[in-house]
Amino acid sequence: RGPDSAGVALYRNGLAAGRTKLCLFAEDPDYAWQALADDLGSAFDDTVSVEVRGSHAVLDTGAAAADYEPWLVEHHPEVQLVSAGERIEIYKETGLPEDVVRKFDLRAMSGSHALGHTRMATESAVTTDGSHPFSTGLDLCLVHNGSLSNHNRLRQNLQKKGIVIRTENDTEVAAGYLTWKLAQGASLKQAMLDSLEDLDGFYTFAVGTKKGFAVLRDPIACKPAVLAETDDYVAFASEYRAFAALPGIEKAKVWEPEPAIVYSWGE
């Protein structure tokens, strides 16, 4: 197998209170993003700025979280909402990881933390919106290595509870589950621990929030995972060789996370 798509959730450039970043995707390479920003600004009596990167655009808006997505669905169904929040920006596309990095000029960007993923689709179509990371709540994203067996029934139940799930990908269902648990008042750690009871299958989750990130392996832990920590950074990957070029890795604490244990930083 080989990778058919890739994506990165980058946390950077926090906005002022009451402002929200909307990261949007359009199939049309010449999409009129400024016209959409002007339209959104007129609809919500707001000044909306826009930054275009490849097939994606990041809009800075004062629209309330409960308002912008229904408005986009009604007035601009040709665009896809990829993420929303104070700090999160998700960029993802079909193609090899190096090509995706180049398309969005990701090497020129920096932030406090990021989650990246590449996949070979086995349970859904090879599309941009079916690629990781998935975001189903403000500043929340999830990447997943593995497969869930009960995602269809869980998708139906979450949609009845008002969670928006756009694709057939089981990972988006897991992200929606965490969004729902957090909305019920659970902490991120408790939501992830609850997933051990409610999600069937095998998986390693990496979850990003505006404060940091967390990692969880299922109780069987058949999917590989490894962590590295120094005074300067924490890194997570599915293979040891991914750490080889990291600065100071020879002095890092490197270990494989234990099954059914939540490891978190910044939370």
Image (spheres, rainbow, N blue to C red):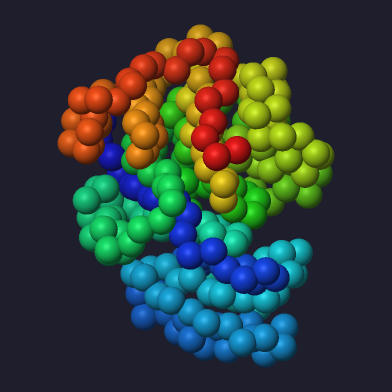
Against 225, residue 56 (above or below) is below
Where residue 243 sits: x, y (%)?
A: 25, 31
What residue appears at the point 66 percent right and 22 percent down from the top-left corner? 193
Where residue 195 sits: x, y (%)?
A: 66, 25
Residue 10 visible in the current orientation: no
What residue appears at the point 67 percent right and 69 percent down from the top-left corner? 17
Left or right: residue 5 versus residue 185 is: left
Against 138, residue 63 (above or below) is below
Task: Please tell me in which quadrant of the rendered image residue 80 appears.
Answer: bottom right
Where residue 163 sits: x, y (%)?
A: 73, 48
What residue appears at the point 70 percent right and 70 percent down from the top-left corner? 18
**What is the total number of numbered labels drawn onto the structure image?**
0
Residue placed farthest to the front in the image? 231
Where residue 68 sits: x, y (%)?
A: 69, 70
**Quadrant into which the N terminus falls:** top left
Left or right: residue 120 versus residue 115 is: left
Work out whether residue 31 or residue 56 is closer to the camera in this orientation and state it.
56
Left or right: residue 266 versus residue 67 is: left
Work out whether residue 64 or residue 69 is closer to the camera in this orientation and state it.
64
Against 28, residue 131 (above or below) is above
Left or right: residue 91 versus residue 37 is: left
Residue 170 visible in the current orientation: yes
**Quadrant into which the C terminus falls:** top right
Work out whether residue 148 or residue 105 is closer to the camera in this orientation and state it.
105
What residue appears at the point 33 percent right and 20 percent down from the top-left corner? 254
